Image (cartoon, rainbow, N blue to C red):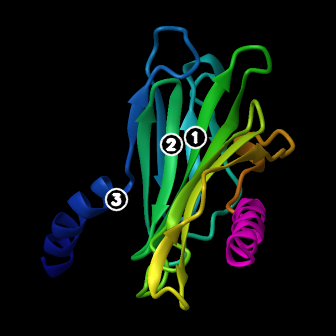
């Protein structure tokens, strides 16, 4: 009886934690399913155009963050949020390749207690357009300084859902730009 009660209490948590989205991704007017499988740490899509066969990402290191799947205008967003930082990955179904492709990434950080390194950025993987809005704490002026908006190109190879994990080097490339532009600001 105790096991039965435990399962009944646990079942809503398991169902809700799947973070499921139902949406027509492949454009055939039949609803598809996208969810996070917390047992395997993967994003799973079941498309009607593939007879609902599982399409899975690689294993994603979710650390202790809060992951979610959200609807986007043309697809879905996979996000992980921590206490002071997080990122989003936007996916869209490509009718020509019949695959789900990563089309954009964004990240935010609140920085340290002085908000040094705070800001947000995004990259459009279809065009290579990067936009970053970052701040740094200037210790000589004792204030938070906004770095002028960084607009540049940042290219990545095509990444499809089956190849996706959170080991893209986007955070590193973004940090390089932050330190470069922070250095320019400090040298003025």
Query: Judging from the image, what secondary structure is the residue with disc 2 in?
Result: strand
Question: Measured from the top left, where is residue 133 in percent x and y?
Answer: 56, 56
Gap between marks 1 and 2 measured at Cα: 4 Å
Badge 1 vs badge 2, beta-carbon distance below 8 Å: yes
Indicate which disc, 1 or 2, sits on the residue closer to the N terminus: 2
Q: Is residue 150 above or below residue 173?
A: above
Read off the magenta span: 167-188
Residue 109 located within the stretch drawn in magenta: no
Q: Is residue 7 visible?
A: yes
Relative horizontal placement of residue 105, taking residue 159 as reference (left or right): left
Say the numbered circle drawn on residue 77: 2
Tell me which numbered mark, 1 or 3, is placed earlier along the sequence. Answer: 3
In the picture shown, does residue 145 fall above or below 153? below
CA gap between label 1 and label 3 equals: 20 Å
Vertical order, 119 against 117 (above or below): above
Q: What residue do we see at 71% from left, 62% from top?
A: 174
The residue beneath circle 1 is 90
Q: Quadrant of residue 129?
A: top right
**x, y percent for residue 12:** 21, 58
Find the distance from the CA under tag 2 to the CA under tag 3. Answer: 16 Å
On whether residue 181 falls in the magenta region, the answer is yes
Residue, disc 3: 17
> Badge 1 local density, few (<14 within 10 Å), some, or many (20+)?
many
Q: 127 or 81, which lies in front?
A: 127
Q: Would you say the magenta stretch is mainly helix, strand or loop?
A: helix
Q: Identify the residue shown where x is 39% and y is 30%.
A: 22
């Amino acid at each position: 009886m105790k096991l039965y009660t435990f399962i009944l209490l646990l079942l809503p948590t398991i169902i809700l934690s799947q973070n499921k989205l139902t949406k027509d991704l492949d454009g055939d007017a039949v609803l598809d399913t996208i969810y996070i499988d917390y047992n395997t740490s993967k994003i799973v899509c079941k498309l009607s155009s593939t007879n609902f066969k599982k399409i899975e990402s690689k294993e994603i290191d979710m650390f202790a963050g809060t992951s979610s799947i959200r609807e986007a205008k043309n697809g879905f967003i996979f996000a992980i949020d921590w206490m002071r930082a997080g990122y989003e990955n936007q996916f869209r179904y490509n009718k020509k390749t019949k695959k789900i492709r990563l089309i954009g990434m964004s990240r935010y950080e609140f920085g340290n207690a002085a908000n040094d390194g705070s800001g947000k950025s995004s990259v459009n993987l279809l065009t290579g357009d990067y936009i970053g809005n970052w701040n740094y704490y200037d210790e000589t002026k004792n204030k938070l300084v906004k770095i002028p908006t960084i607009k540049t190109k940042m290219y990545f190879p095509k990444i499809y859902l089956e190849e996706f994990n959170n080991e893209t080097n986007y955070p590193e490339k973004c940090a390089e730009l932050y330190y470069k532009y922070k250095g320019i600001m400090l040298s003025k």
